[in-house]
Amino acid sequence: MDEEREEPQQLTQVVYDLLRTHLDARALPEGLVLGEAAISRALSVSRTPVRSALEQLLAQQRVVTHAGRGMLVSYGNKAPEPLRLDLVDAGLQVPETDDFGFSGGAERIYPDVEKVLSSCAAFGRFHVNQTAMASFYGTSRTVASVVLNQLEHVGLVRQDRHARWYVERLTAQRAAEHYSIRQLLEPEALRLAAPTIDQGFLRQCWERLVTAMQRGIHADLALIDQIERDLHFDIVHRCPNAQLVKIINESQRPLISTSYTIERYHDIEVTHGTLPQHLNVMNSLLEGNFDRAGEALRYHLEQASKVNIPRLEKLPPLDADRYPPYLTPTS
């Protein structure tokens, strides 16, 4: 399908209006390089509407061409010196609302993409084909771009200078650094969050844990996954300190792969062994002993690092039928 047909008709106008508003207000420094790739990343849209918007601004002499890529902000100077800065740092105000209308599509596929990429990171470096990804999920390239930009913010993917997306390998060293951050910060976040958590919700989490422990190695993988999210996301992330949660989340996301490897090679015994540690945390929360809950969480994370970091160094190669066609292993 032609990419232009996938974009809402008003998308070019939205991008144009946003850039023109900044230029009219002289909110961007003269000479700032406006590149298609940089703008598309900042606004989470594809390059097609960005290109069209820049062409309109060029025709109105609000921007000028230069010898390099992109166009330059010009307030009357026909040949300003190129100024290469991050667009947001340079003054671009990105709307917080979803003016582009893609949140629904992105929200639909984001959980699966995150899980797939996280589970592959422990096995090596992968190239992510954005077009193939959009086709795989039956969505537009723009929706795929939104998802990849979100994943870039949490450190699961990065984009090279040629605008190609990659999942970087989760090395033992990187994993150790993330676990250290989590061991320091998650217990404190739990202590701050605990007084606000409903006892009914905690009871539900406790019941899921007991069910999984009773089923033993036959516990459903989806149930194990939910138990992990109950503690590390749904409870810890209720901490009222938003900056603390942000830092924790940035170290949690890359480590999702260490738990998802059980779905690749059925290593359920190791994960099942952590359930009593979860139970100690949950029992302490239900009893109102938040300090003990924090210490139990710290112990759990220390044990997880001792088990999972060595596993990262011993994983066998990932078979081709265990990752989707929009991923390609790289050296």
Image (cartoon, grey):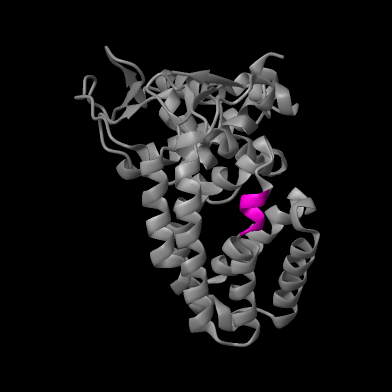
Q: Is residue 221 left or right of residue 192?
A: right
Q: Is residue 98 above or below residue 121?
A: below
Closer-to-camera residue (312/125)? 312
Q: Is residue 181 left or right of residue 106?
A: left
Magenta part of the chain: 269-273
Q: Is residue 92 left or right of residue 96?
A: left
Residue drawn at (59%, 87%) of the image? 288
Can residue 18 be seen at all in this image of the molecule?
Answer: no
Closer-to-camera residue (53/180)? 180
- Quadrant assignment, res 45: top right
Residue drawn at (46%, 54%) of the image? 305
**Quadrant where the image shows the N terminus:** top right
Q: Position of residue 162 (x, y in %)?
A: 41, 18
- Quadrant assignment, res 313: top left
Closer-to-camera residue (13/156)? 156
Q: Is residue 90 above or below residue 284?
A: above
> Is residue 85 on the magenta stretch?
no
Residue drawn at (26%, 27%) of the image? 76
> Is residue 270 on the magenta stretch?
yes
Residue drawn at (63%, 75%) of the image? 282
